[in-house]
Image (spheres, rainbow, N blue to C red):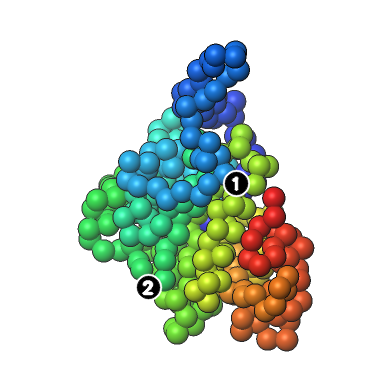
């Protein structure tokens, strides 16, 4: 739904929680020569991993910190009839994202990279959806009907979900709307940003989508993130607005990346990209250092 890899730290408390989490997991032991070794799996540092239901709380907390200042997420919980104290509002925010992670574990795909769930991506695969009864009940999403205030429910069920559904169908077309990979959330912990974690998750799926000849679809709630995704070949197709709030409407930019394939050694082109395919392929190579579909560095 929304994507971010550049959200600033929201509070010293949030950073403290994240640091405690890292310290809890990074078990170190002395070696015979006095050097320090860690029991933490080295490959977790830079290997993209698929999460399970056992990881939902950790992944939900990562996204909660990443999107703590995001306009779209605040649009759901900042209502005139919603909770007023910050702790209750934060718990609702965390629960929403934890339920969302669980629904994607059950019926989609959740990936992470980094030693402590530093960056998390939620994907809906082609020909999948998350609105079956099993997913709604097992994930806990059903609780939102009772947890959200009246205005929050109207924003989610009467405005957001219908608008996102209809827009995806209009932008991709009836023939392609179920054939695309859908990036619902991509978020990195504030204290883990700048290490390329989000890019690893994105490029990992780009390679898969390219191999399957499928587009990737997303909604971005930040202009800075629009620029970020444009570097990977995404294009803004249109802007939509959420208007039930009292302040400025919340803008979501609809972005699509067409599949890319290797034309020849060291050269990429965009499938169905028309006459601009070679130009876009060259741009993609410069940005992510691709050659033969591999990322350098």
Specify the quadrant of the image occupied by residue 14. top right
Q: CA distance from mark 1 to mark 2?
A: 27 Å
Q: Is residue 153 left or right of residue 123?
A: left
Q: Does any portion of residue 78 appear in the rendered image? A: no
5, above or below 157, in the image: above
Residue beneath label 1, please? 197
Q: Does any portion of residue 34 appear in the rendered image? A: yes
User: N-terminal of the two: label 1 or label 2?
Assistant: 2
Q: SS for tag 1?
A: helix
Residue beneath label 2, please? 127
Q: Is residue 297 left or right of residue 86?
A: right
186 and 151: which is toward the camera: 186
Q: Is residue 105 left or right of residue 26?
A: left
Q: Tell me residue 224's x, y (percent).
A: 69, 54
Disc 2 packing (10 Å; few <14; some 14–19; many ≥20): few
Residue at image location 35% in from the left, 53% down from the top: 105
Residue at image location 50% in from the left, 18% down from the top: 29
Q: Tell me residue 26's x, y (percent).
A: 50, 26
Q: Residue furthest front?
A: 32
Q: Tell me residue 101's x, y (percent).
A: 39, 49
């Amino acid at each position: 739904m929304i994507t971010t890899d550049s959200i600033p730290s929201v509070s010293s408390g949030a950073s403290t929680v994240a640091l405690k989490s890292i310290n809890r997991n990074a078990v170190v032991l002395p070696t015979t020569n006095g050097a320090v070794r860690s029991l933490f799996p080295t490959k977790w540092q830079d290997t993209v991993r698929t999460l399970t239901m056992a990881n939902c709380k950790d992944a939900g907390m990562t996204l909660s910190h990443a999107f703590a200042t995001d306009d779209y997420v605040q649009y759901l919980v900042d209502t005139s009839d919603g909770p007023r104290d910050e702790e209750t509002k934060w718990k609702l925010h965390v629960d929403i994202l934890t339920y969302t992670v669980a629904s994607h574990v059950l019926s989609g795909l959740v990936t992470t990279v980094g030693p402590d769930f530093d960056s998390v991506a939620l994907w809906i695969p082609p020909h999948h959806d998350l609105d079956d009864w099993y997913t709604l009940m097992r994930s806990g999403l059903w609780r939102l009907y009772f947890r959200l205030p009246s205005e929050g429910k109207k924003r989610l069920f009467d405005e957001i979900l219908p608008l996102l559904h209809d827009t995806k169908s209009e932008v991709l077309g009836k023939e392609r709307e179920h054939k695309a990979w859908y990036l619902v959330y991509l978020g990195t912990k504030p204290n883990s940003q700048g290490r390329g974690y989000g890019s690893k998750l994105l490029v990992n799926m780009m390679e898969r989508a390219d191999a399957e000849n499928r587009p990737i679809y997303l909604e971005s709630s930040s202009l800075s993130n629009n620029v970020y995704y444009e570097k990977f070949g995404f294009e803004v197709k249109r802007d939509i607005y959420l208007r039930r709030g009292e302040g400025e409407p919340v803008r979501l930019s609809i972005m699509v990346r067409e599949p890319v394939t290797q034309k020849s050694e060291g050269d990429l082109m965009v499938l169905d990209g028309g006459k601009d395919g070679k130009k876009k392929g060259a741009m993609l190579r410069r940005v992510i250092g691709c050659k033969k579909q591999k990322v350098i560095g």
